[in-house]
Image (tube, rainbow, N blue to C red):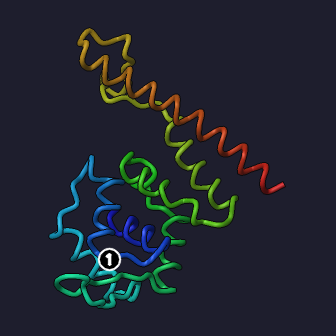
Amino acid sequence: MLELAILGFLYDAPLHGYVLRRHIAALTGHVRPVAESTLYPAIKRLEKAGLLVRATEPGAVAAPRHVLTLTDAGGRELMRRLAEPAQREITDENHWFTLLAFLRHLADPAAQAAVLRRRLAFLEEPASFFYDGDRPLSAEELDDPFRRGVLTIARATSRAELAWLRDTLASLDGVGR
């Protein structure tokens, strides 16, 4: 998720490390705060893999600043990750939102639609947070008002996402005609 966010933001424009950290925190920080001890090793891994380069600029007041730029290989890697997301990026909501934030960079509407169809198929599978054996429980079957609340909120969120997915797929399918 972190590497995808780094590649996605740098695809938009070169950024200073601290600006990149702010962007990532705005996208994912409500779930997982972005610590320097996590971000900078990820940047170094991507740099070592040739997916981004770091250039040093003089600082306006103090120390020099590092500007990160995506390489051509980094752009190709971003396109690969967007077109062929791992299953976790489809099924885990936080990973999904990170993928979705950059899916516009995938230029082919059919490729975008293929990713959305994977998410749609996942959401259409019967599921619950609570089970009776192997059978998913609905909110109406629960006496616990808090668990019922979890399922009621999840149902509303899923319905909204399903409607958005179907509308967007119809729009993307219309582009290809």
In this view of the protein, which residue sits in the foreground, 82 or 28?
28
| Amino acid tagged 1 | His
In this view of the protein, which residue sits in the foreground, 131 or 41?
41
Q: Position of residue 171 (x, y in %)?
A: 72, 46
Q: Looking at the figure, which quarter contains the N terminus?
A: bottom left
Q: In this view, does 1 lie to the left or right of 122?
A: left
Q: Looking at the figure, which quarter contains the C terminus?
A: bottom right
Q: In which quarter of the image is residue 107?
A: bottom right
Q: Position of residue 112 (x, y in %)?
A: 62, 58
Q: Is residue 173 left or right of residue 35?
A: right
170 up-or-down from 136: above or below? below
Task: Look at 44% across and 56% down and name the residue there.
Answer: 87
In this view of the protein, which residue sits in the foreground, 121 or 65?
65
**Residue at the far front in the pictured view:** 61
174 up-or-down from 107: above or below? above
Tally of marks: 1
Q: Where is residue 70 in the image (x, y as percent from the top left)?
A: 44, 81
Mark 1, residue position: 16
